[in-house]
Structures are given as structure tokens and as C-alpha cells.
Amino acid sequence: MPKKKTALTIEERLQQALVPAEEQPYEVPENWVLVRLGAVCFFENGYAFKSDKFSSEKGIPVIRISNIKENNVDLDDCIKTLEENIDEKYIVHQGDLLIAMSGATTGKNGVYMSANIAYLNQRVGNIKVKNKELLIEKFRNFYIANMQNEILNTAYGGAQPNISSQKMSVMTFPLPPLSEQQRIVERIEELFAKLDEAKERLQEVAESFAVRKAAILHKAFTGELTQQWRRENGVSDESWEEETIGDVCTVNPKKIDAKNLDDNLEVSFVPMAAVSDVFGEIVNHEVKNLQDVRTGFTNFSEGDVIFAKITPCMENGKSAIVGPLVNDIGYGSTEFYVLRCKKELYNKYLYHMVRNTTFRAEAKAVMTGAVGQQRVPKTFLQEYQLLLPTLSEQHEIVRLIDDLLARERKAQQATEQALASIDLMKKSILARAFRGELGTNKASEASALELLRQVLVEN
């Protein structure tokens, strides 16, 4: 007969729960104790539901990885199951903390806030509090948020990483007295609320950049931006003339005659990916031999404006002015239109015009072709009507646009840095919280070690 296992004593169970002194990664207040996460939480993995039992209309919701959003669980697009007699351990309760156990979003976690019954799908884990007299759920939630990188570091596998509940269960967990946990939660929520308010205001500022940029370009192409310049330079408000792009620009000019050029001649090559939709410029053109690109690609020269004609590149703003080219020869994607300005049109003026969201919206409205492969017709560009100022005023308009947009970009970068700093501040607050550095601890309170011992005795 196999030997019967002897039940562990309270002290043995306590030692199992504690992190040995030599393994403790940092110091905590004297009335705190460092334990294994598995001593205060237990883990449930999801159930492999039968796909033929899934329904979009009726049944009990099944929470999948895709339902775990940032800090919460979204049931709006939850699939349902018609399976019956599912083990109760797969039921998700209000306040449970769910975590993606594998895939591209491994480690993403969120709290289930609904009072309705739901089931846990496979590859979703549930980190449940063992005893609410020992651990507050919100304290657990903030701890997991703080440890997200460490949790990811325990993952195994390559392109599809996985985390295991066994590895998570041995992670170090700082356990304060229960009342201190509550104070820490309240302090974190108070600080986070202030940061969230600041973040909301900054996001409003960030969103207004696009509106202000559109306003600048609208003023530029209606003449309002250079009203004072015209008065100062004796230029009539009636000097703007009605033209089409085709009148003042060649759309897709003829390719250069490359018949007599060496096949091994190095030339510049610009794939669609090389054009930044954010900055509106060519960021990393390639160098190829002429023999590899002379047929089947678009040819352009320095100073040309290239304009993406295919969705979604056009809508995203993939346009650029072609800069210096290797051996003064450039080729690129066939999904570019090449716009070569005639003497009465300044290429930077045209560039700002086709990058304008108003222009792109009009281009989108006339796209043709199958879904996902829609393109702007060449005739749209050739026949597009514009009011064209004198060449000298075009240069002034470009100067003002560049100056104003540079200021906007500088302000936008400052806003983005401020938003990033808020996220860093949140991480700093959490790191300090779990080291007892938020100034909330009361040394006179009974040690969490005694509370842990008491709970072990009772259970």
C-alpha cells in the first residue's frame, strides 16, 4: 500500500507560503510579509468549449481573450454557448480578474464587472482571491497591473507566448495588513484619478491638432492666410486664377529613356512602405540595379510629388516630394501617381494641397474598384479644380504653412511626451505602492504575518 501523506502543520504551511529571506527581491515595512502569489490567490484555466455549440444569439456568454480589454472585460461581442453541465469552476463571477494566458496579447488582464453569469474559455485564466479576509480584490488587481512585464517574462514559446499558472503562483507578493491594503487602494485610486483627468485634457489637446492643421490649410488654399502679404506687396485679391491640376502639372509623365543605360547602374527605389503617412516624406528609399526596376515600376525624378492612389494608403496621407536620387534616377511602386509641376506651380504648394484632408476626402469619394483594391482615378487629379495664386504667393503660403505646422508639431510632441509621462507616473506609483512607499502604512498595526497564520489555522 502507498504511504499515506502526513498533513502539514500550520508552521510548515506558513513556511511554504513565505518567500525565503535569500529570495526576497526588496524590503517592505516590518508589519508586511512577502509571500508567494499562490498563497493568497488560486488560478482557474478556461474550458475548451465545443465550437459547434457556439451561438451569437442565445446561451451563456463565453469570455475569450478578445473580450479582455484594457483593465476590463467587454461582453458586447461575446460569443455564447449552448453546452450544458459545465463545471462550476469555469463560471466567472463579478470582481474576478481575468488574464490572457497565450497569444499576441499574453498578459493582458481585466476585471469582470458584470453581475450576469458567464463562462471562461480556454487560454483565459482567472486569478481568484483565496480569502477576502486576507486580501482585497482591488489590491490584487493593482498588483497584477504592476507585475505585467514580470508576468510576460515568465512566458514560454515563440511567436505565440504562453504563461503558466504554476510560474505565476511562485511570484513574490507583498502582503500588508488588510486595513493598509485598503488605504493603498484608496491612495492609488486618488492619484490615478488626478492623472486620468490630466490625461483626458491632454488627449483633448492632442485631438485638436488635426482640427487646427485643417484650419491652417483651409486658410492657406482660400487666400485668407496671405491676405496681409498681398496688401503689403500690392497683389490684388483677384490675382488667383481658376485652373485644373492637369493645366499646371503633368500627371504620370513619360518614363526616362533608359535603353542605353547600364543594367547594373544603381538607382533609387521607393516602395509604398518607404513613404511615411505621418510625416509625408520618403524615410528610407532602397538602392537597386536598373535591370531590376526598369520595367513594371513607376519612374520619377527629383522634385516630383508622388501621391498614393490605392486605399488605405491614399486616405492615410502617403504623399511626398521626391528628394535627391542615386544617379538622379528613381523608381517606385506602381500605386503612386507622379505629379510633375509646370513652371507656374510650386511643388511644395501642390504637396501641401494633396496632403490636405479635404483633398483626400474628395479623392476617396470618387475611388473605383473592388473593396480593398480601390484607387483614385487619374482623371480626378487631371480635372481637379483649384484657385491658383501667383508663384511668389505660393512660396509665401508654403513658408507660412511650414512655419505654423512646425509649431503645431512641436506642441504635439510636447503633448505626446506629457501623455507618456502620465503612464510612467502610474507605473512609478504602483511600484512604490507595493514597497510601502506611499506614506499610508501604520507601523502600529498588527503584522500581516499573524493574519496569514490565523487564516491558515481557520482553513
Image (cartoon, rainbow, N blue to C red):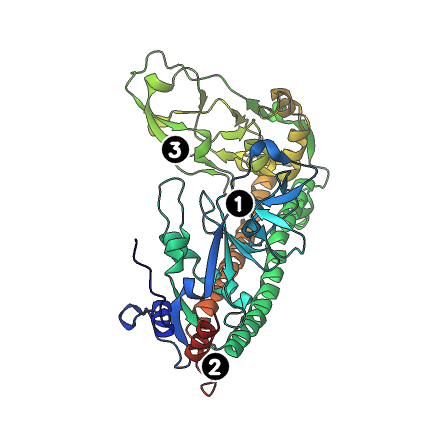
Name the residue carrying label 1. Answer: 65
In the picture, residue 66 is in which quadrant?
A: top right
Label 2, secondary structure: give it. loop
**Front tag of 1 and 3:** 1
Name the residue carrying label 2. Answer: 441
Label located before the other in sequence (1 or 3): 1
Name the residue carrying label 3. Answer: 285
Percent position of residue 399, x then y: 55, 46
Check disc 1 and give the amino acid type: Ile
Is 154 placed above or below 122 here?
Answer: below
Residue 130 shows in the view: yes
Is 55 placed above or below 246 here?
Answer: below
List the single residue furthest toward the right.
238
Percent position of residue 141, x then y: 52, 62
- Residue in the foreground of this view, choosing between 142 and 408: 142
Percent position of residue 110, x then y: 55, 55
Neighbour class for label 2 at 10 Å: few (<14), some, many (≥20)?
A: some
